Image (cartoon, rainbow, N blue to C red):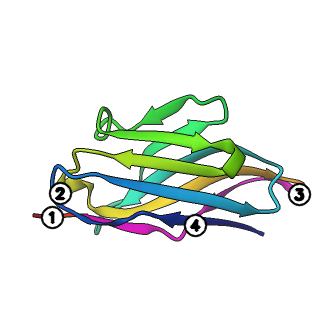
């Protein structure tokens, strides 16, 4: 079994900051990439950012220069530092990890953490 557990969500005013964390645990051989998606009410889930084992990262255009993704491979943890938050960043944020186990390779999802940006 593999579990992804997110933390760090909450409510913040526009212009504020939050830091999300996601820890992967279980029988893991290697983690190829980790990332964050988000889903706002009535909208499709969208990629926010991801980071590969090499350290290379990708960002959605809407969060570039405001969000930073980082990874601690020793702790199987990925972080999302979110600065200059806007009301349109309000969504449930989901962690995803591309994990290789002895039985194969698959994507795993966390349960989601709510981020609300409101005056």
Q: CA distance from mark 4 to mark 2?
A: 25 Å
At horizontal 44% and vertical 56% (from top left) the residue drawn is 20
- Asked which secondary structure carries label 4, the reply is strand
Residue 117 percent location from the top left of the image? 21, 61
Disc sitting over residue 118 in the figure:
1
Callout 1 environment at 10 Å: few (<14), some (14 to 19), or many (20+)?
some
Report the front residue among 72 and 66: 72
| In the image: residue 16, left or right of residue 100 | left
Q: Are marks 2 and 1 in contact (CB under 8 Å)?
A: yes
Residue 54 percent location from the top left of the image? 65, 29
Residue 50 visible to an observer of this rendering: yes
At horizontal 21% and vertical 52% (from top left) the residue drawn is 16
Depth check, mark 4 against mark 2: the one in front is 4
- Asked which secondary structure carries label 3, the reply is loop
- Asked which secondary structure carries label 2, the reply is helix
Disc sitting over residue 87 in the figure:
2
State whether residue 99 is above or below residue 114. above
| In the image: residue 119, left or right of residue 4 | left
| In the image: residue 106, left or right of residue 110 | right
The residue pinned by badge 4 equals 5
Q: CA distance from mark 2 to mark 1?
A: 6 Å
Question: Was residue 104 drawn as part of the magenta stretch in this picture?
Answer: yes
Q: Earlier in the sequence, mark 1 or mark 3?
A: 3
Question: Was residue 79 drawn as part of the magenta stretch in this picture?
Answer: no
Stretch in magenta: 103-116
The residue pinned by badge 3 equals 103
Q: Are marks 4 and 3 in contact (CB under 8 Å)?
A: no
């Amino acid at each position: 079994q593999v579990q992804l557990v997110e933390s760090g969500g909450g409510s913040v005013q526009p212009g504020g900051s939050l830091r999300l964390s996601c820890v992967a645990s279980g029988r893991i051989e290697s983690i190829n990439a980790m990332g964050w998606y988000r889903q706002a009410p009535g909208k499709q889930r969208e990629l926010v950012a991801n980071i590969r084992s090499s350290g290379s990262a990708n960002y959605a255009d809407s969060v570039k220069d405001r969000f930073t993704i980082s990874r601690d491979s020793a702790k199987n943890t990925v972080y999302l530092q979110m600065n200059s938050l806007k009301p349109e960043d309000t969504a449930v944020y989901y962690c995803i990890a591309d994990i290789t186990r002895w039985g194969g390779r698959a994507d795993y999802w966390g349960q989601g953490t709510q981020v609300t940006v409101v005056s």
